[in-house]
Amino acid sequence: MSVCRLGFSVLVYGLGSKKALLEDFRVSHLSQEIHLVINGFYPSITLKSILNALTCEVLEHQGTFRTPSDQIHFIAQTLKDTPDLHVYLLIYNIDGPMLRGEKTQSALGQLASLPNLHLVASIDHINAPLVWDQFKQSQFNWLWWECVTFQHYTEETSYENSLLVQQTDTLVLSSLTYVLRSLTPNARGIFKLLVKFKLENKDNPSYTGLSFQDFYQRCREAFLVNSDLSLRTQLIEFKDHKLIRTRKGADGAEYLIVAVETSTLMDFLENEDDD
Amino acid sequence: MATSSFSRGCFVFKPSAKKKKMTVGLERYFTHGSEGSESSEVRFKICLDLWNKVKMETEALQDELNRNILDSLLEFTRKCSSTRDHSDWASQMRASEIPTAALVLGVNVPDHDMTFQSLFDLLRHSVTPHVASLQAKECGALKHLMKRVLERLMGTVVAVGDEEEEELQQTDPELQKSVHCSLTALCDWYISKTKKSSCRAPGKKRSSSVVDGQHQQPPVVIIFKDLEAFNPRVLQDFILICSRYIKRLPLMFIFGIATSPSTIQHMLPNSVSSLLCIELFQSLSCTQHLTAVIDKLILTSSFPFKLSGKVMQVLVSIFLYHDFSVRNFIKGLQLALLEHFHSQPLSSLCCRKNEAQLNVQQLGPADLERIRQLPSFKRYLKEQEEQDNLMTDDAHLKDVCQKLIKDLHKYHKNYYPILRCLHCLTSSLPRYPLGKQIRELHLICLEKNVWESEDYQSAMKLLKMLAKDELISLLQTCAEVLRPVRSKKMKNALVQLEELLAKLKLLDAAAEVAPSVEENLTAPVRNLQKKTDLFQLQKMLLEMNESRRSKRMSPFEILRNEAVEFVDSLVKNHLSLPESKPLYEVCYYTSSATVRRHLNATPRTSIQAALSSPYSYIQNDSLKTEDGTVSNAAPDICIAYKLHLECGRLINLYDWLEAYSTVVSAAEGSNPDSDGFGKVDEVKHARFIRAVSELEFLGFVKATRKKTDHVARLTWGGC
């Protein structure tokens, strides 16, 4: 704790799940402090959710921000104005699959370099230190501690699609982003249209999906397709990736349903808007 | 657990406001784990003092070292703005190019921040208020770059405290949203700014005409902090656009370059770089910076905390082989400081001499016992006669300790000036026997007695061959080094040195005694002309050699030998090892392994060591094995890891499962001949799946589509 207060960030590494160890630390030392726990291994964690948690719940500011850098700037300013406020950030697996991006790491680095914000994190992947370059490393100011526990990674692996267990039908955010990034911009536009329509009708209990004709009309208006055939080809591709399902409606027309949960879709849309 | 959930990744915990908020200070954390907690408040105070001192000194040093480069940059900026007004052809031509300062800073990127910050402030205060500083990561496209430039320039209004100015400031945020993002808008804004200040000119008293000119047309400076990271296309487009506006807007660029000036040629084609008028500025090299830092913080007797040879070696090697960053070196020094005060209860004596004397009187019995146990103190005891007295009488021990602390301080006071003298004398010798930098000499002195090393002997021999003027200049530098030291022994040494110097200078006046030397030489040569056989010739040459060696040395040579022996005696007296002094553990931090573990860690090695030999972490006898094999009582993940190492690039999961269950059955002790041995049952299957998922999580394997039911290995070689 003294090390944290003096400007260093603590990084814990070693074989075995360090979650229990860090939980102990949290309960024993941080119970009197404002702290934020982030599960880096959670496949739907985004930078935005972390920053929102910081601004809304810790700093109690209800406004919204245009870009993450604005948000970070606001956080930095507020913390500079209140030097007595110490916030602790406890990140399990800062090398988690959603936090590995360059933007996320540099944002976290900026947060870590604030004097009032103290960071304790753990890493597990063998190539994790590659994520940081010289500049980020100096922003984080890591002090490395080796803590080998040999405990099983029960929580961390419970989210991943295991190799040997049957693939479930629901997709998580990371896989959704990955699949869509490999498609053409037009395909992405088409999918977004479908998603927006679903989100508009999410509270509608009699929502049966978008009919094919309707969908084709909308895509034509948005200049995303120019013929029936190309739209069908695109839809076949989505079906292969298990992104949509089709059903024959009461009037015999095809209805398209997105096979992903609403919350995941909303996160996905937010991410897409940022990029 | 409160922090696992399927739908959320982020959890916020705030302490309830009802509980009385204990303001836990930093002090409590420090005393909480440290040894010898009686004196921990004192130690903590000293530690914090020294920490702040380190910070302040490094900042002051940084300012001082950067002063040269910043001054020359400011000169350049001022010159650019003033030449614009001339009307001769050369400056007209120059006026169509954008003046650019290319500042080569070095690869230690983390250290550049402070330099740029001070540059920014200086420019703001003395040359122009219109300065914008850009980082590559915020300028991915041309429009972002433009937006940042405009925001930073127009948002920063000159704070003159005028009413009109404040009004403009308030309307500025709204203006920002509606102002079109282009340089025309910037030009208009600039013109309105300069017109305003020139309108107010008649009312104000002008102090000098130079200031007058500047206020008319202050240059607009844009600093590109990390040039190599910018997208070349974006940069080229920006420069092309700016060069069209150069007549209306006095722009100036500063490029911060980390590698070498040729990056400008790589990034910008000739058509673009011809629009710039580039001038190169080189900043201080990082090794010079490090030398200055070491001088200020380590090689000085005013800083009581010292590093032992090994720790210093670790820090310097991290600097030289990893990142060239002085900031990380300081960080390592601070870490060593913290660890020392945390783990060594006697470090309350590691402070200035007067404070240390006071603290000795306040030592408790536990601390006095610790002193008695110190190895250096035990060695000291052996040399004393009244051992019993020291072991039992606390007050007497305290007096002795006070004397020892005083001796230690005196030792340090004499050590550093002599070290610097030795460095002056030997740093210019051919092949640098004692190192080129003073830190190398310091490391040699910390490891062993320097006069016992062969390098030292060869250095002394080389010194005995110096020419007179070189010797005089070197001895004069030594005298300069010794002069400011306020210590009796150093003053004596200085007096002796000055006598030597005076004698050497007087030699110029006396006539050389050359002819007598030549006479001696000619006699043996005549003998050689007689006829002899091989054996006689050999004998005669040996005799000649002997006579030449024992010939009379010239007065200069006598004086030279005297000088070298004098230096030798100083070194032997004062440059002894710190470990030979009693109570040195109080000031010296020796645990280099801790520092290395915290700063220079290797997580992958740790994981692989834990996987291949779990015995090193879990001290269970059943896990002891020979090298290369794994005991079947090891954790599942270790067994799976070991088995996967024997496979090639693609691993068949079923085979792996079979091998795994065989090993695990053997561990369970079931009969190898029984039917159920090696069969895969539910539990083993589940354990195997868990182990493979964990290995995938760690990054050793990954799923592959190349073959069904196979996984790809991600690590190769001996690992």
Image (cartoon, helix red, strand yellow):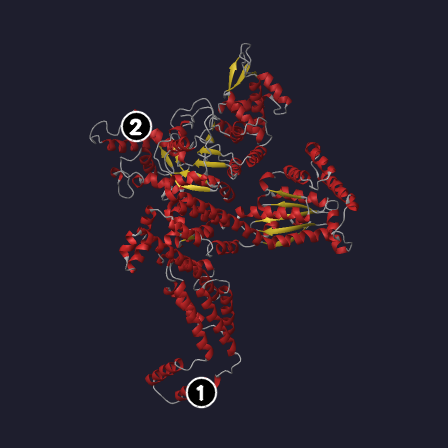
Reading the image, the residue beneath label 1 is: B519
Q: In the image, residue B346 lies at what x, y percent?
A: 37, 48
Among the 4 quarters of the image, the one containing residue B693:
top left
Could you say which is closer to the camera, residue A129 or residue B393? B393
Query: x, y percentage for residue B160?
Result: 70, 42
Query: Of the residues under marks 1 and 2, which one precedes in the sequence?
Result: 1
Q: Is residue B109 above or below residue B185?
A: below
Query: Which labelled disc corresponds to residue B684?
Result: 2
Comparing B14 with A89, the one in front is B14
Any part of residue A145 in sight:
yes
Establish if B38 lies above or below A40: below
Question: Alpha-carbon neighbours of circle 1 within 10 Å: few (<14), some, or many (≥20)?
Answer: few
Q: Residue at x 61, y 48 (%)?
A: B119
In the rendered structure, are the residues bearing label 1 and label 2 in contact, judged by CB atoms less than 8 Å apart? no
Q: Position of residue B443 (x, y in %)?
A: 42, 57
Q: Is residue A219 above or below residue B110?
A: above
